Amino acid sequence: MTTPLIEATALSKHFEVGGGGLFGLRKPATLKAVDEVSFTIKAGETLGLVGESGCGKSTLGRLLLRLIEPTSGRVAFDGNEITGIGRMEMRGFRRSMQIIFQDPYGALNPRMSVEDIIAEPLLIHGARMNAETRGKVAQMLEKVGLPARALDRFPHEFSGGQRQRIGIARALVLHPRLIVCDEAVSALDVSVQAQIVNLLQDLQREMGLTYLFIAHDLSVVRHISDRVAVMYLGKMVEVADKATIYAAPLHPYTQALIAAVPAQHPAQRSRGKRQRIVGDIPSALNPPSGCRFHTRCPHVMPVCRETAPPLRTTAPGHQVACHLIDP
């Protein structure tokens, strides 16, 4: 059996919120941003991670890279556990694990030239700013579709799409194996989104990259992903290959998300009534008991209010956390 590139096991991140007050008598509340999430990503594939804002997607991506430390659980990279290892030991893995941020305007230092921005990861990992390093930087900039003459320019001189290309070049200059794309196209115009997604796919084929693609736009996720994982209020509720998720989702939350995706052509519109998710997502500070989706689920049963359903395998490669599904 092939070892997955990334394996997360019962991964959790809880934040202490509030506390203090007069004489420090107010106890802090616990926000369960990610709660006992387990999944794998195979080398060379793209796992799309979807869910409403606040469900814990971005927190989960940062946990994989150890940009934030987990409360509990473990992460293994290519069979090597990286949870709890020291800073110097973790540095050896940093070259292989990079992130592309959501905001192409806030992610780049406005006081640094494009050359300095892209070269920075190389310098952090011991390279010197010499002709060889400059050559690598220029080559990577051209690989993402920008001319080498742009190296002396500054971020404010570029459009949002061009800035995101610079961010991609910075992430790829170390030739990593895993890239966390944290809403990497959500801040861009639709036409520019398509260009960046196509660029990411071309780079994946050329460089053998593995992606965790975090997004809320299910149309974009459908285009780029091999498998799709659905999160709700810190929990994973369904994981399956792309074709299964979009053609035959099993969890009521996934069904509602898929039904809400606008049809690309009038002929594709369903004649049936569109499913809607009623109500707002509950607070992660006080999540519902049992299944966290039961407060908004049209199929809720008594057991849903009392017992949290485990993430069960219903078919090869298809996992669902729902009491409606027979084990």
Image (tube, rainbow, N blue to C red):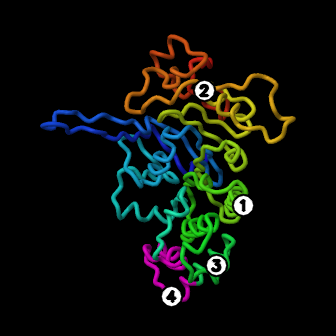
Whole-Å distance between the Cαs marked 4 and 1?
32 Å
Confirm or deny contact between disc 4 and disc 1 (CB under 8 A). no
Which residue carries the number 2 mark?
Answer: 277
Q: Amino acid at mark 4?
A: Asn
Say what amino acid the circle numbered 3 marks: Gln
Q: Is residue 254 above or below residue 153?
A: above
Compare marks 4 and 2 and give the one earlier in the sequence.
4
In the rendered view, does 66 fall on the left or right side of 156?
Answer: left
Marked residue nearer the N-terminal end (3 or 2): 3
- Which numbered mark, 1 or 3, is in the foreground of this view? 1
For disc 1, the marked residue is 195
Which mark, residue 139? 3
Q: Nearer the viewer, residue 282 or 137?
A: 282
Q: Quadrant of residue 247?
A: top right
Q: What is the secondary structure assignment of the residue under circle 2? A: loop
Q: Which residue is mark 4?
A: 130
Residue type marked 1: Gln
Q: CA distance from mark 1 to mark 3?
A: 20 Å
Q: Residues within 10 Å of mark 3 (few under 14, many from 20)?
A: some
Label the magenta part by its dominant secondary structure.
helix
